[in-house]
Amino acid sequence: MQDAFGQPQTAICFGGTSEIATAILLRLASERLTDVVLVGRDEAGLEAAADRLRAAGIARASVITADASDPTSAGPAVERAFEAVKQPVDLVLMAVGMLGDQELDDDSAERTATMMTVNVTWPSAVLAQVRGRMVAQGMGKILVLSSVAAIRTRKANYTYGAGKMGLDGFALGLADSVRGTGVTVQIARPGFVTSRMTAHLKPIPFSTTPDVAADKIVAGLSGKATVLWSPGILRVVFAIFRIVPPMLWRKMPA
Amino acid sequence: MVLHPTSTSDLEAAFSSDAAQQGGVIARGLGRSYGDPAQVSGGLVLVNDAFNECSAIHPETGEVTVGSGVSIDTLLATSIPQGFFVPVTPGTRQVTIGGAIAADIHGKNHHVDGSFMAHVTSMDLMTPSGLKHVTPTNDPELFWATAGGMGLTGVILRATLTMLKIPSAYVAVDTTRHRNLDEVMNEMVTGDDRYRYSVAWVDCMTSGDRMGRAVLTRGDHAAADLVEGRPGPEKAIPTAPRLGVPFEAPSGLLNRLSITAFNEAWFRAAPKNKIGGIESISTFFHPLDGVSNWNRLYGSRGFVQYQFAVPDTAGETVRIAIERLSASKVPSFLAVLKRFGAGTPGPISFPTPGWTLALDLPIGPPALPKVLNELDDLVAEAGGRIYLAKDARLNPVHIETMYPRIGEFRAVLDRVDPNGLMTSDLAHRLNLRGKN
């Protein structure tokens, strides 16, 4: 049960191997978080993340495997995760995402379908099922890890960006739909985060680390803003990027 | 889901409903708790307002049987004209008898009269294993587990308690101002025994020599001859609040600056040394009830209450706590300092002999959660505890240290509620049932 300062005690994380997600959960563990269920595809990776959480004082960390490229697994995964917590769930963290490789994705129907399933279809299906469970609980927070890539797709990663755009829009609507139910939705839009996901890419201006992004997001969790930018300056940068003329935007490097 | 049961069969139906079976059940009175003891996410809240009957007060013994949904406000309105007062009242009349039992509330007379449950002789309790008429002799474990048991033993339907006979509807009050905390604590240790009622309002925004300056008010019900010529008891019935806060203030209105100014004005307004002042019952006991919706002053972010008790041997903890708050720049309103006498046998009833300090803290300062975590550690180390009825943020790791007899409480729950039907957000948050 979350306390008066909004600190969660129980959490489910979809995309449990995400480095930003782990960094967020580690910070919450130093407050009141004691029970975590990690959901993801890579069992060994999930177990490693669970071990890190246990070492940080999480009393109960468990792992559930589910494949985000199969939309029919979304509903059952939510049910299994809620059953595993056994208590009201204070926080659901949606951290599923797949950056892909734009050059390979460009002409591949199969790869593009998978990218869209993993980045938007499966997460949205999960959130729909979570919404029902949390509204029935009468309380809870949902945190969706989006990306600044959701603001405007660009040549270098438009398949990923389009997926995040779909999820980000879904989450904004979800946030409006749960007003007054005791459930809240927040959307984090980190910029370029240097992590496993982006290890092969060259960092760009305003890039950040999972720890810095997590600090910002955790601080935002106890506030009321629906959208959490990190770093905060990106809110301004992307307000400008949104209106850059297409002929210039096309020339944006990686 | 919130229901208003009117009978025991309603309660039985509620217990077996889907909502209860899935999310649990908790009773609610007026819903004025500072924290989350009377709510249960995903479960069923049973409001006790239909249990509102009130027997005649026995003119000799003062015994009365009241429904759990009767408020102290309502009870006083009928009892004062008959020359009786509730044996224990908190700082507000807006609590029900059910809530008073579930929190085993205390008042300014705890050092003399003990807590609310010391004056209750029996109660009817709807547990998940059936309706029980409970007394301290026929089932002492269940009776005392219900005292301060935060509603987890069942739904309280009615209780019989012994009212206090009063000579008038006024209180004779001695008010003294004290330069700092040490001075007021000394005065309370040496002088409280001479008074039925005693409470100190402490300024936590001062430091150095004046750290914890305080106004101490102590008194007893005024003898009839002292108040001759004043309006009779029928006029002393608490009336509707005269002031109100019509809308929610912006969060941050109550900040360091405004609170410092308020505390200063309040300290200066108190008489330095006034013996035998006559005050009405409302003024003396229920100052906050004079302003309706006062909580709106805190804005939408609200506030937390922090109340702890420590044994006499750890009186130093009170000073350290105020120093920490003062040093952390977290603004806090006047704190209430009181001495506790002997506790009841309740395994998780809050009052224990020694000191209790209660603080009102506006939510907002980023340092606040951390400061309170540190105070928890301090209180736990000192052998003290946090008042569950006011808590909204305690770290559950402290529960077994602060309430070392919680095992006895859990054993009673396992007996009367083996399936764990009774629960609340507070119970989940602090793992009161020990099943998390």
Image (spheres, rainbow, N blue to C red):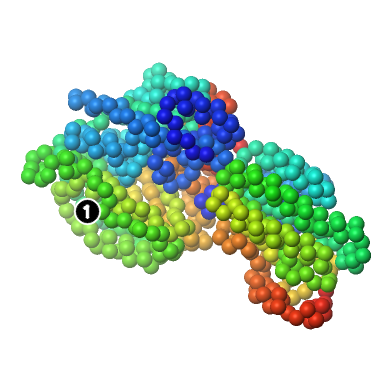
Residue A234, position as x, y percentages in the image: 67, 72
- Quadrant where the C terminus of chain B sits is top right
Q: Is residue B269 visible?
A: yes
Q: Which residue does the numbered mark 1 point to in the structure image?
A: B176
**Relative to B2, A218 lies left or right:** right
Tell me which residue sits at (72%, 44%) in the image.
A78
Tell me which residue sits at (71%, 53%) in the image.
A94
In this view, B52 is above or below B256? above
Tell me which residue sits at (82%, 68%) in the image.
A157
**Relative to A198, B78 lies left or right:** left
Name the foreground residue: B308 vs B381. Answer: B308
**Relative to A189, B5 lies left or right:** left
Look at label 1 and name its amino acid. Thr
Tell me which residue sits at (60%, 42%) in the image.
A136
Name the foreground residue: B60 vs A106. Answer: A106
Residue B4, position as x, y percentages in the image: 44, 34
Name the foreground residue: B154 vs A165. Answer: A165
Residue B346, position as x, y percentages in the image: 42, 30
Q: Is residue A218 visible?
A: no
